[in-house]
């Protein structure tokens, strides 16, 4: 590993990985608004718009568990490079479809599904690569730097630029995203070292048995199982919201396409600032208490957006969202990286995401159904109620996290 006594000295390998990660997330930021805006242009049915959002996360259910075995067998950097190439080709294919006036909701959802398959491979292996390029005591700082980059590129810069480019021509944000995914590959080529997982003691087991092992590992873990279930509540609620946010912003709040992108950037401002505050909050409180702060912030965000239309209060709600996301994600990533051995890390991650993100497509579809029937604001009320309940029902999880982190200190 690379590192030293100073947590801030993350080393050249980390910053090479950071460069690749940043290019990739800027591409995600462009496509973040391009997919739903193109969907809205193709149909006015909220259910079909939500279906496009659901298709992107369906792969975690379909290929998530087998993907973990591949991540633990082969070089995780090379897997990420192949996945980025696939994403680029899919987006270029959508561009040709738009040029040929052949774009449709079915094609858009299909493209989103293939992009989602690539994201399974990237999201399953990246946390292990982070752990390979920094020391254990640097993980909070490393994860917060990656989260800061993701916030700036994925939500602050990418969405408003993507929305602006979409107004100029529907194809431009897709072309830009494809180019950035290719740039991410170039950066990964510069990352020295091998990123093959440690040998698995059960390496002779069948492919099916290795898949089951990852799922059993997470489900039998006293921290990972409740953590994954808590994230499932978050992901169900978050995707219900995300699937209809474009509808809430443009119809209920009356925002233009560019204003919609700018509203996403307000979230990014708070989230970027929060990434630098997470480590201090953890030191002054604990990992578990910090996660409870995240839950409370998300609850306030969702309920406010569901109940108000006043722009000052909408801004307050978006800022609360910016507080919630990086706090939870930095801490949960660090917890997993510290608790899990390398030989099973890929299978753990994909099994964890299989449980944690399993309800994402369901959340997106239910969000679309509720928005179509009663209005998008009621999706937010539902989401705030579900996530807020974690403050009551997940107290054991927060205590176990603090106990596990104390044992490793």
Image (tube, grey):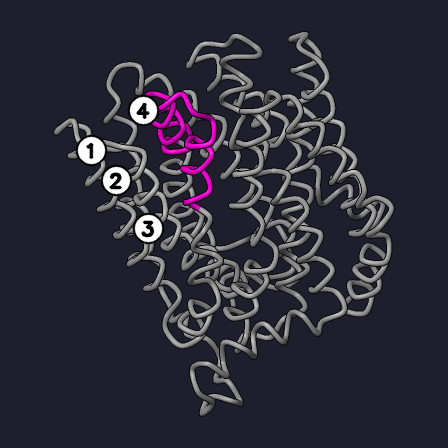
Q: Which residues are magenta?
A: 30-56
Foreground disc of the pair 3, 2: 3
Residue at horizontal 52 percent and vertical 39 percent from the top:
365
Q: CA distance from mark 3 to mark 1?
A: 15 Å
Q: Is residue 354 magenta?
A: no
Residue wearing tag 3:
114
For the residue labelled by badge 4, is the local secondary structure a helix, a strand or a loop? helix
Residue wearing tag 2:
91
Of callouts 3 and 4, which one flags the residue occurring earlier in the amino acid sequence?
A: 4
Circle 2 packing at 10 Å, graded few (<14), some (14-19), many (20+), is: many
Q: CA distance from mark 4 to mark 1?
A: 15 Å
**Residue ranking furthest to the front:** 373
Q: CA distance from mark 3 to mark 2?
A: 10 Å
Q: CA distance from mark 2 to mark 1?
A: 6 Å
Q: Position of residue 155 (x, y in %)?
A: 49, 30
Residue wearing tag 4:
42
Position above or below: 151 against 59: above
Residue 401 appears left or right of 121: right
Q: Position of residue 70 (x, y in %)?
A: 40, 72
Q: Say whether marks 3 and 4 touch (CB < 8 Å).
A: no
Residue 373 appears left or right of 332: left
Of callouts 4 and 1, which one flags the residue occurring earlier in the amino acid sequence?
A: 4
Position above or below: 201 against 142: below
Q: Is residue 32 magenta?
A: yes
Q: Position of residue 401 (x, y in %)?
A: 79, 60
Q: CA distance from mark 3 to mark 4?
A: 20 Å
Residue at horizontal 42 percent and vertical 47 percent from the top:
21
Q: Say whether marks 2 and 1 touch (CB < 8 Å).
A: yes
Residue wearing tag 1:
95
């Amino acid at each position: 590993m690379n590192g030293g006594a100073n947590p801030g000295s993350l080393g050249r390998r980390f910053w090479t990985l950071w460069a690749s990660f940043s290019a990739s997330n800027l591409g995600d930021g462009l496509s973040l608004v391009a997919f739903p805006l193109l969907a809205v242009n193709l149909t006015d049915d909220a259910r079909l718009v939500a279906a496009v959002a659901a298709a992107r996360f369906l792969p975690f259910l379909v290929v998530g568990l087998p993907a973990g075995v591949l991540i633990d067998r082969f070089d995780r950097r090379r897997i990420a490079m192949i996945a980025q190439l696939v994403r680029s080709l899919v987006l270029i294919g959508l561009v040709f479809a738009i040029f040929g006036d052949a774009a449709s909701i079915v094609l858009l959802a299909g493209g989103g599904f293939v992009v989602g398959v690539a994201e399974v491979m990237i999201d399953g292996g990246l946390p292990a690569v982070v752990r390979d390029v920094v020391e254990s005591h640097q993980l909070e700082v490393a994860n917060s730097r990656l989260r800061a980059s993701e916030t700036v590129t994925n939500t602050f810069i990418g969405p408003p630029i993507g929305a602006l480019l979409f107004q100029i021509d529907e194809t431009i944000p897709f072309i830009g995203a494809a180019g950035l995914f290719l740039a991410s590959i170039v950066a990964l080529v510069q990352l020295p070292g091998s990123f093959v997982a440690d040998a698995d003691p059960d390496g002779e087991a069948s492919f099916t048995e290795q898949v089951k092992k990852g799922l059993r590992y997470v489900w039998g873990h006293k921290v990972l199982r409740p953590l994954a279930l808590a994230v499932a509540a978050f992901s169900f609620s978050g995707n219900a919201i995300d699937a209809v946010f474009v509808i809430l912003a443009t119809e209920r709040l009356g925002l233009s396409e560019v204003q919609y992108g700018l509203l996403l950037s307000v979230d990014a401002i708070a989230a970027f600032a929060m990434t630098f505050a997470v480590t201090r909050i953890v030191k002054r409180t604990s990992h578990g208490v910090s996660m409870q702060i995240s839950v409370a912030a998300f609850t306030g965000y969702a309920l406010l957006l569901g109940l108000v239309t006043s722009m000052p209060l909408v801004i307050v709600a978006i800022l609360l969202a910016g507080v919630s996301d990086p706090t939870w994600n930095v801490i949960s990533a660090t917890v997993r990286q510290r608790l899990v051995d390398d030989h099973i890390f890929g299978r753990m991650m994909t099994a964890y995401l299989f449980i944690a993100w399993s309800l994402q497509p369901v959340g997106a579809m239910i969000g679309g159904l509720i928005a179509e029937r009663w209005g998008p604001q009621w999706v937010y009320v539902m989401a705030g109620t579900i996530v807020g309940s974690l403050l009551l029902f997940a107290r054991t999880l927060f205590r176990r996290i603090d106990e596990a982190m104390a044992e490793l200190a």
